Amino acid sequence: MLLERDDEQAALDRLLADSAGGRGRVAVVTGVTGSGKTALLYHFAERAAEAGVTWLSAIGSRAEQDLPLGVFSQLFLNASIPAERAALAAQLLDSAGVQAANWYDTPPGAVERLRITQGLCNAVVNLSDTQPVLVTIDDVHYADKASLWQLQFFIRRLTSARILLVLTEADRVITTDPALDLNLLHHPRCLQIELAPLSPDGVTDLVRRNLDVPDAEALGARYHQVSGGNPLLVNAILDDHRELLRGPGEQRPDAPIPTAGPRLTRSVHTLLDHAGPEVLEVARGLAVLGDSFFHTPADLFDAEPGTVGQALDHLTAVGLLEAERFRHPIARAAVLSGMDPERRDEMNHRAARLLHTEGAAPTVMARHLIAGTPPKDPWVLPVLREAAEQALLNDDAELAVRCLKPAAALCADAAQRARITAMLARAEWRINPALAERHIPDLVAAVDAGTLRQSETHDLIRLMLWHGRLEPAQDLMATYTARAAEGDAEAAARLSITRHLAWSSYPSSQDAAALDRGAAGDTSLTSTTTHLRLQAARLLTSVLRDGPGKNTTRTAEGVLQSVTLSDDTAEAVHSMLYALIYSDRVDRAAHWSQVCHEDALERDVPTWRAMIDSIRAEVALRQGELPTAVRHARAALEVLRPRSWGVVAGLPLSTLLHATTEMGRYGEAAALLRQPVPDAMFKTRFGLHYLHARGHYHLALDQVQTALGDFLTCGELMREWGIDTPALVSWRTGAASACLRMGDQERATALMEEQRTLPGARTPRTRGISLRLFAATVELRQRPALLREAVDLLQSAGDGLQRAYTLAALAGNLQALGEMSKARMIGNLAHSTASACHAEPLTRKMLAHGSADDKADAIADTVGADEGLSVLSEAEQRVASLAALGYSNREIARKIHITTSTVEQHLTRAYRKLKVNGRRDLPARMSPEMSTTPA
């Protein structure tokens, strides 16, 4: 009879009342370990005892199954039994002890055994003459044979006694004596109570009553999936979860189920201990096999299929298995943690050998080989290597590392061990480049011994350059060059790629003209991947040296479209994204970095993810999206700590430093400058970014001389290295800003004049920034036209921050010229643009320069702009936005290729719809996005 949890106590209460009227009753409570049957039994019995019922109790134990009458004798230990009856029972039990050795050899009708049996039964039955009696035996399936015999006799004599007998037993896998089962089934007043597992709703109710969480139903469903509804497991998970919520640090209310909760682990061990050795061995076999279901647990040890089937049924019933698999990794981990290491190794080795015989996949076999110390069978080393290769193809670098470490230890051949070490370094580089650095000495020795292949040597050089080991890397390149086979186009192309990579990172490392020396002119003789990598390497070199060309964007996007992230192409992707950035095509870099980010995120390769996050941060900075830049840079530095970045740390650190400075978070910026960086970084392109960002930090704090020093150092290095292109690092604009603050207008003019002649200086962003600084060096009345042009250029380039600075400069110049209304309007626009970028210092500066009324208007205009502009057509918005910036009707007509009359008509309609008196009122109503259009 299957009862709901709420009905169980009531059912037992009814049985007790019935038996008290002289109708002996029997109840058998069945449930798996952890189902709560013991708690139910004792709760009921304690209430009955409080009501005046005589309670006799006993507990079965596996350890005492060989003790004759060990369970039945416990019934007479109750202090409420009258002394004379207790003494009689003791005598009978003593007699039974004498008979114990041949108890079952005696014929069933033997007088002595019947006398003892009847006497013990009467001792209990006679107690019910004066008051009702409750007899409880917990875990009756562990009772000794003599006690089970006694129980059969006792049950047949309950018909008219005022006795309720309540037994608890485990599920039917752990069998009770068949004769006892038969007596119970035929007893007219026996009630079977089965404690079913908790339903999902039942588990959810427990969660709701025990945890203060927002979504109890979702959490309850997860608890049920892990526990199968076994109350023991559910309560253990609850305890672990409560501990997690109370733990240190900030915890979410919906914190996930703990992955290694101590209480849950102990509960799993409890279930297995109660199940018996056969079930425990099957559980261990399943835990070792995991998902390797070529075989059953019986194949790992000598066991009958029927025994294994019963054990699987039991493990399913107690909530550990579902479809013959562990419901949750927690349970499997708990089983494995309880195994003797030698036994676990033995079972894993046997599983691996069985799988090898079946021709299983290398990764499947490897998981058993690496679970402990792998055996030294001849087939193990090739399997581990193949598994590592497959794992890398599947983007599982951690599995590859776990396979390669024992493989290197097993390998006796120096050449093979060198290749395994190279593969290990490659796998570890994906996880954390700092891990791979320790292999450099061994790999350099392998190059000297001639046991490392060219592709592996290329990886080694890249690793050395990453970690700032330029001189040894140059020596290695010389060796690489000397050994390159003449006429081997693939090897020559790889050599050229390596040279370009070294030069684009360390531009002083070699002569740029010699980068392609020895490379095949016809790259069609190389593989497609090598051809694309070479194309990417050459393009970045070209952009750094000569600025962007006509085909730079098309070539870069072509490469990005043709490759996917891999160990071989990661540097090509990195190079092409920076080629777009250094060409001021930040819009395209934003698109492609997002595409690459999604790829890296899906494939979960930490180093690739960090590299792309760093690029996304730089893109966001150059678009004026300061919070986004900070978020991406921090993400990059969280995935890989600065130590792991080597010299490349200059990229994410500089972006974060520059962005926090522009946001006015000077304390955070100062902390970043205290972060140690490698000395070798300042010999690299990445160090230029760092120096430039540090210069802007000092400039923001009005440490002008120090800032100028950083900017000029940038300039000296870039000139010396032959990469003096302003889109890389615009050091002249920083230096010019410092000079203007120091009153050195002549030097600032020279710097800006010089910048206008450089490669890449004509791109919209670079030219817009240059025009803003150049405007500060010319006559006051010449400045507004230059600044308006700069605003247009920066709008088309998509750099909101630089546009805000330019609008602020325009407002200041208009104010100096006495055009107060226009200055106020442009100042409001500069304020809203700076505010949108979260450039707090510039925002405060714009508010400080206006009156109290101006500040209120600036805030009101920002709030109401979008609603007001919605009444304008697109053409009216475009014309009104240009008029707001101070363009005349004729200038607007020329700019957007319409007639002056059409401009006048658009403005007239715009004034009427916006309910303003003229163009001087327009900027206060224009949103930042609508205030200018591309030229």
Image (cartoon, helix red, strand yellow):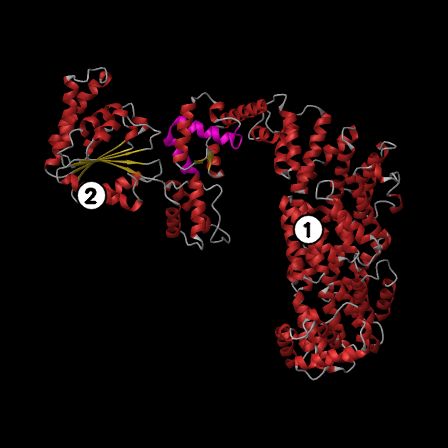
Task: Classify 10 Å Cα crowding around label 1: few (below 14), some (14-19), many (20 and above).
Answer: some
Residue placed furthest toward the bottom: 917
Is residue 364 rendered to the left or right of residue 104?
Answer: right
Query: Is residue 630 highlighted in magenta?
Result: no
Q: Element at badge 1?
A: helix
64 w.r.t. 833: above or below:
above
Q: Which type of secondary structure does the marked residue at label 2 adopt?
A: helix
Alpha carbon distance from label 1 to label 2: 69 Å
Q: Position of residue 172 (x, y in %)?
A: 33, 30
Q: Nearer the viewer, residue 504 or 473?
A: 504
The kind of residue tagged 1 is Val
Residue to which mark 1 is pinned: 595
Residue 320 appears in the picture as rendered: yes
Picture layout, residue 258 above or below residue 215: above
617 lies left or right of 758? left
Confirm whether residue 69 shows in the render: no
Residue range in magenta is 265-293
Q: Residue at x 84, y 61 (%)?
A: 761
Looking at the rendered image, the quarter that the N terminus falls into is top left
